[in-house]
Each structure stands twice: as structure tokens, then as C-alpha cells.
């Protein structure tokens, strides 16, 4: 069919081949037969041939190079789609020998009359840069030219090329900053995401921190602001907020927001209503990083709206909300119920919602949140139940008023039939008891009895650590626990063995009469253990606590070393260490720096010169030109005589032209 003389058969063949590719089948064997048809005069066939070539040009480079002259002719085709497709195929051939041809083609396409072809030229720039980084200087010239383009179709693509090739060249953005802000609303959605992320970093280098005069303890306000308010209301509220933000602090110069900073915030705000979740997320991170505290609240409702999307979107949004809610808790408090867990939520969504609820907990809403947590503990999802117990522990450490209530509730869970629930409760109780151990010796006794039943290594280790650390509060029970543990020492996990050795050492120092032989027995067992950590620990502790002639000076301080007061652990949100990554980025999601990630710059100490963003109006536009028109007669001139009238060239009609009655 491809070798046929009939265009209809060729078209049918190409449709079938493209359908094969769409289904994931390999059609590379047909490359020689397809590439011959690149010179076909039928536009529809030619389009499909180029679609095929873009897919396989990189794999079949030698055959593609044979047709390079045809692609070059395609760059001159009258049809803009063919010109764009030819450039796309050319940039897909990953051979350094054709770099000069690609560079020439990109430069020509950047000056093309069609914005679609110019957009394709912007897409080709990163491909050429990855093939030959030495072409960077020439490509920057093309990027600079395309950044000046006034069409919305090109804007997103050229900013993407800028981010890939020369993100450090902030000077290229100065003259185009206001244009990009004004075009933003009309750019296609993925272009909006790229531009917003770039402008976020740009603004952090060019404007002052709007919160420099705001107290760190000030909670964000305006979180319950009307979302779909009228423009007049919004303008009034913005003016009020600006006045609040600009209120001078003692001995500080009052902050006045740069008009370009305000332009960016004003032009991105309507995009919070975008149907694309990525655009909403991009605007949210821009406001979080750039806006005054009193204005950040507007993003809360938009982010809560995204929680109605499918679980993948929810996961990304909740990761960012969890980070935001640590610094700006007041922003999400009105939407507390939106973060309640549904039975249909996947486990990872449940855990993230728990994280947000824990971050939002305070003295006023803690009773409501704890009632909600009580329901979650009855869930069949064990990972979720474990996360809920940890959340209760964090609430107890952060809010002292409910610490005893939470502790009693967790102790009740120790009678639960499910071993995992009991184990997680033990680990959390251990952390809470460290805050006030003298008040809770009964709980320590109760937990000592659990060593017979609990088999989870982390829980057993936590109980043993508690008994060893507070053995003076339970002097009768501690030696008996050591006796039981010595029996099962060889069968325990490594983490439990280490805590048995620690318990033996502490009891030897505080109650050597009862535990001397037991301690020696445990140390002898550990001496021949398969794990070298346990052998080393046993050797070290024997030298430290059992004084001999060879003992060093440290043995005198054994009690101080083992029984020193230890600070209670601080239960913090795992999202607290993520705030150094830009919100909405892959690095923030993974909590690790991803390839290509660019750090969010710090605010400048002094405001850079704002005049760099001023665009000079060309003389040809300002100049008053001479307009010629033909008069048909009248007292002002002879019939049909041309007459020159002074008027502005850029006007549709000269201002000084007299009107005829």
C-alpha cells in the first residue's frame, strides 16, 4: 500500500501504522517504506509520515539522514503544519554531524510568520542543547528573540526552553516580565505552570520580602475570604491588606510593595479557578512564597477544592498542604472538616490527611480531632491505625492539656487483641512517659507485664528501655523482667538484644545484689552472638561496669553515663524539613533533590533597580508621521488633490483629519 501510486491507499496504510504505534506495537521495520513517502504531495499523508518519523527517527538515524534534504525542503513548505513537522523530525535525529543544519533551521523557524512554527522552534532548542551544549550562546540569542514574541502560543514553550538552557540568565526576563504577566491568563495550561514557576524564582531575586515587617508569630488572616467575590470587593480588600502589610514596625522603614510584584500577584489570582490542578498548585505555591501573609489565605479554598479530584491529585495537594499547615496553620483551620478521612480513601491519602489534622490541632479544636481519631482506631487498615496512634502521641506532646487524656486512651489500647495496635501504642506511650515518668509508674508496671505477649521487636525494645531507664520506680519488677529476657535472649531480634544488655547494665549499677549473676550471664551470651554490634556492645559494657585492674578511667563514671537524665523526644511533623524545597516541585514530593531542580533564591536585602523592567517605546511608534489622503473637494482644497495632514502613525485615523459633513 505504501508503494502504491494512489494517495488513498497510502493514507490508509499510514493510518494503520500510526494506530499500531498507538497500541504500543513496534513498527520500526516499515521505516524504509515510510520515509520514501515524505516527498508525497498529499498533505494528509505527509502529516502522518512526519508523525511516524518523529517516533522512529532516533532509532533509525542512518536511514533518516538519507532523507535529510527532503526535511530541509519541508522547512520551506507553504503549509505551517508541514514546516513545523519537518523541524520536529530534524530535531529528533540525534546525530552531531547535522547540528549546524539544526541550528540554521531553528533560527529560520524562530523568525517564521506562523506562531505554531515558532513554538516548535522553542521545543527544538532543548533537544539541540542536550545534543551539543557548546551551542549554548547561539541558542540563548534565539531564546532572547522568542521571549520578545507577543503571542500566547509561543510564551510557554520559550520559557520552558529558557529553564532548560539558561535559567541563570535572569537578565533576559527583565524586559519581558510585564508582558509575561499580562499574557499569563491566555497561555495554554502547561505553559502557565512553567511560566508561574519561573516567575516565582524571578520575583524572589527582584523584590523585597513583603513580610519583613510582620511579626513571626502572626498567624495568616483572611483564610475565610470570599472566593468568588466581585472585583470591587477584591480591590477594596487588597487595599486594606496592603495597608496592614505596610504598617511600619518600630525602628523599621515601612514596606511598600513594588508595582511589578503586585502585578504578578493580581494576574495569577484568577488562575486559582483553573480547571487544571497543576495550574492551581503552581499559583498556590507562588502565593505561599511571594504574597504578604494577610493575602495567602485565598489559596486555601482553591486547594481544598482539589481534594475532590482523583487520588493522585489528592496525594500531591495534601503533601503541599501538610507543609503549608506547619507555617500557616490559620489558613486551613476553617476547612478542618475537609480533611476528615473517608472509608474509601487509599491508605496514603488517609495518612496525609492525618498529618494535616495533627498540624491543625490546637486547644480549641483538639477535642473534636481526638473524637475523630477514636473512630479511626477501629479501622481495619492496620497501617492507618498505627499512623493514628502516632498522631495522638504528637497531639499529646504539642498540647499539654490533653496529655493525660491521650495517655490513658493509649493505655486502654494495650488490651486490644490486635498485636500491631498494642505494639504501636507501646512505642508512643514510651515517648510520652519520658515527659513525666514519676507520675506514671503504674503504667510502666502494666507495660512490663506485656513482655510475655508482645512479639513485635520495636515494642519489646521500647518496654525494656522504659524499665531500664526508670528501674528505680519499679525496683521489684525490673529484675524479674531481666530474668525472663535472659531466658529468651538467643531467640530475640538484634534491637531487643541491645536493650536487654542495656537493661542488665543499668540494673547492675542500681541493684547489683539481685542482678550481678544475671548481668554476667547476659554479657556472656552476647559475647558469642553472631551480630558484631552486640558482641562489641557487650565487650564495651563489661569493661565499663565491672571494675578490674585493666579498667580505664571511664568506669568511675559508669553511673553518670548510663543513668543520666535524657531529654524527652520531640515528636515533630516529618514535613517540617521539607520547607527548603519549592512547593509543588518533584523534589518536595520526594523530599530529595531531583535532577534539574533549581533552588528557590532568598529574598534580597535591598531592592534591585526596578527600571530594568521598563521597556523603551521605539521612536517609530512615538513619531508623528505624515498621513496622505485624497480630498473629494470642498472649500479646504481643490477636488481630488492629495493633502498631507499631521497625525499619529499608530492611530487608525489621523486626529487632525477634518470631518466632512
Image (spheres, helix red, strand yellow):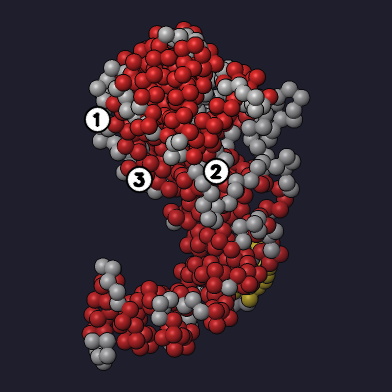
Q: Whole-Å distance between the Cαs marked 3 and 1?
A: 23 Å
In the displayed image of the protein, which residue is found farthest to the right? 251
Under circle 3, the secondary element is helix
Dot 3 or dot 1: first in sequence order is 3
Q: Is there CB contact under 8 Å for labels 2 and 1?
A: no
Q: Quadrant of residue 644?
A: bottom right
Dot 2 or dot 3: first in sequence order is 3
Residue at the (56%, 58%) spot, across then down: 163
Q: Residue 12: x and y, percent?
A: 23, 80
According to the picture, the residue beneath numbered tag 2 turns out to be 581
Residue at the (40%, 11%) spot, across then down: 477
Q: Is there CB contact under 8 Å for labels 3 and 1?
A: no
Q: Residues within 10 Å of mark 3 (few under 14, many from 20)?
A: few
Under circle 2, the secondary element is loop
Q: Residue 31: x and y, percent?
A: 34, 83
Q: Is there CB contact under 8 Å for labels 2 and 3?
A: no
Q: Residue 498: x and y, percent?
A: 46, 30
Front-lying residue, 525 or 607: 525
Decide: is 501 above or below 38: above
Q: Where's the N terminus, which quadrant?
A: bottom left
Under circle 1, the secondary element is loop
Q: Does residue 313 appear anywhere in the picture?
A: yes
Residue at the (36%, 20%) spot, across then down: 484
According to the picture, the residue beneath numbered tag 1 turns out to be 380
Q: Is residue 213 left or right of residue 180?
A: right
Decide: is 228 above or below 96: above
Q: Whole-Å distance between the Cαs marked 2 and 3?
A: 20 Å
Q: Is residue 632 left or right of residue 186?
A: right
According to the picture, the residue beneath numbered tag 3 turns out to be 312
Amino acid at each position: 500500500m505504501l508503494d502504491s501510486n494512489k494517495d488513498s491507499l497510502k493514507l490508509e496504510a499510514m493510518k494503520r501504522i500510526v494506530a499500531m504505534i498507538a497500541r504500543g506495537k513496534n513498527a520500526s521495520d516499515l521505516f524504509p517504506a515510510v520515509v520514501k513517502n515524505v516527498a508525497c504531495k498529499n498533505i494528509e499523508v505527509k502529516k502522518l509520515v512526519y508523525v511516524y518519523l518523529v517516533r522512529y527517527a532516533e532509532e533509525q538515524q542512518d536511514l533518516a539522514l538519507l532523507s535529510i534534504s527532503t526535511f530541509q525542503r519541508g522547512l520551506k513548505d507553504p503549509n505551517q503544519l508541514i514546516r513545523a513537522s519537518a523541524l520536529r523530525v530534524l530535531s529528533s535525529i540525534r546525530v552531531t554531524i547535522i547540528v549546524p543544519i539544526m541550528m540554521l533551521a531553528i533560527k529560520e523557524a524562530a523568525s517564521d510568520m506562523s506562531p505554531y512554527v515558532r513554538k516548535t522552534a522553542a521545543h527544538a532548542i532543548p533537544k539541540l542543547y542536550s545534543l551539543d551544549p557548546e551551542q549554548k550562546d547561539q541558542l540563548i540569542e534565539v531564546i532572547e528573540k522568542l521571549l520578545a514574541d507577543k503571542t500566547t502560543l509561543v510564551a510557554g514553550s520559550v520559557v520552558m526552553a529558557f529553564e532548560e538552557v539558561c535559567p541563570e540568565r535572569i537578565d533576559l526576563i527583565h524586559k519581558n516580565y510585564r508582558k509575561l504577566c499580562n499574557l499569563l491568563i491566555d497561555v495554554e495550561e502547561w505553559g502557565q505552570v512553567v511560566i508561574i514557576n519561573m516567575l516565582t524564582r524571578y520575583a524572589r531575586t527582584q523584590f523585597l520580602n513583603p513580610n519583613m515587617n510582620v511579626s513571626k508569630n502572626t498567624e495568616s488572616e483572611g483564610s475565610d475570604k470570599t472566593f468568588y467575590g466581585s472585583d470591587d470587593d477584591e480591590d477594596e480588600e487588597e487595599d486594606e491588606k496592603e495597608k496592614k502589610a505596610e504598617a511600619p514596625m518600630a525602628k523599621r522603614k515601612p514596606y511598600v510593595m513594588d508595582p511589578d510584584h503586585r502585578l504578578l500577584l493580581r494576574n495569577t489570582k484568577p488562575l486559582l479557578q483553573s480547571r487544571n490542578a497543576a495550574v492551581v498548585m503552581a499559583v498556590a505555591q507562588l502565593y505561599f512564597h511571594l504574597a504578604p501573609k494577610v493575602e495567602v489565605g485565598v489559596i486555601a479554598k482553591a486547594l481544598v477544592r482539589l481534594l475532590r479530584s482523583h487520588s493522585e491529585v489528592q496525594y500531591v495537594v495534601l503533601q503541599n498542604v501538610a507543609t503549608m499547615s506547619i507555617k500557616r496553620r490559620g489558613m486551613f483551620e476553617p476547612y478542618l472538616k475537609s480533611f476528615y478521612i473517608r472509608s474509601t480513601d487509599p491508605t496514603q491519602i488517609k495518612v496525609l490527611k492525618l498529618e494535616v489534622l495533627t498540624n491543625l490541632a490546637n486547644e480549641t479544636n483538639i477535642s473534636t480531632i481526638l473524637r475523630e481519631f477514636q473512630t479511626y482506631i477501629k479501622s481495619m487498615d492496620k497501617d492507618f491505625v498505627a499512623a493514628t496512634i502516632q498522631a495522638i502521641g504528637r497531639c499529646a506532646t504539642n498540647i499539654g492539656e490533653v496529655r493525660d487524656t491521650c495517655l490513658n486512651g493509649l493505655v486502654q489500647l494495650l488490651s486490644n487483641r490486635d498485636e500491631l495496635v498494642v505494639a504501636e501504642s507501646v512505642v508512643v506511650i514510651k515517648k510520652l512517659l519520658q515527659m513525666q515518668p514519676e507520675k506514671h509508674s503504674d503504667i510502666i508496671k502494666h507495660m512490663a507485664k506485656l513482655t510475655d505477649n508482645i512479639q513485635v521487636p520495636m515494642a519489646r525494645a521500647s518496654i525494656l528501655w522504659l524499665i531500664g531507664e526508670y528501674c528505680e520506680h519499679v525496683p521489684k519488677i525490673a529484675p524479674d523482667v531481666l530474668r525472663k529476657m535472659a531466658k529468651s535472649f538467643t531467640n530475640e531480634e538484634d534491637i531487643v538484644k541491645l536493650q536487654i544488655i542495656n537493661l542488665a547494665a543499668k540494673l547492675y549499677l542500681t541493684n547489683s545484689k539481685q542482678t550481678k549473676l544475671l548481668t554476667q550471664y547476659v554479657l556472656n551470651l552476647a559475647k558469642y552472638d553472631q551480630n558484631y554490634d552486640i558482641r562489641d556492645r557487650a565487650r564495651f559494657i563489661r569493661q565499663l561496669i565491672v571494675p578490674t585492674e585493666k579498667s580505664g578511667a571511664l568506669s568511675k563514671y559508669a553511673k553518670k553515663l548510663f543513668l543520666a537524665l535524657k531529654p524527652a523526644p520531640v515528636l515533630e511533623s516529618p514535613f517540617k524539613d521539607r520547607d527548603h524545597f519549592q512547593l509543588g516541585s518533584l523534589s518536595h514530593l520526594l523530599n530529595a533533590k531531583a535532577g534539574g531542580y533549581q533552588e528557590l533564591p532568598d529574598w534580597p536585602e535591598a531592592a534591585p533597580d526596578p527600571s530594568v523592567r521598563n521597556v523603551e517605546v521605539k521612536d517609530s511608534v512615538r513619531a508623528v508621521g505624515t498621513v496622505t489622503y485624497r480630498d473629494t473637494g470642498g472649500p479646504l482644497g481643490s477636488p481630488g488633490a492629495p493633502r498631507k495632514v499631521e497625525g499619529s502613525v499608530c492611530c487608525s485615523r489621523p486626529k487632525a483629519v477634518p470631518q466632512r459633513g
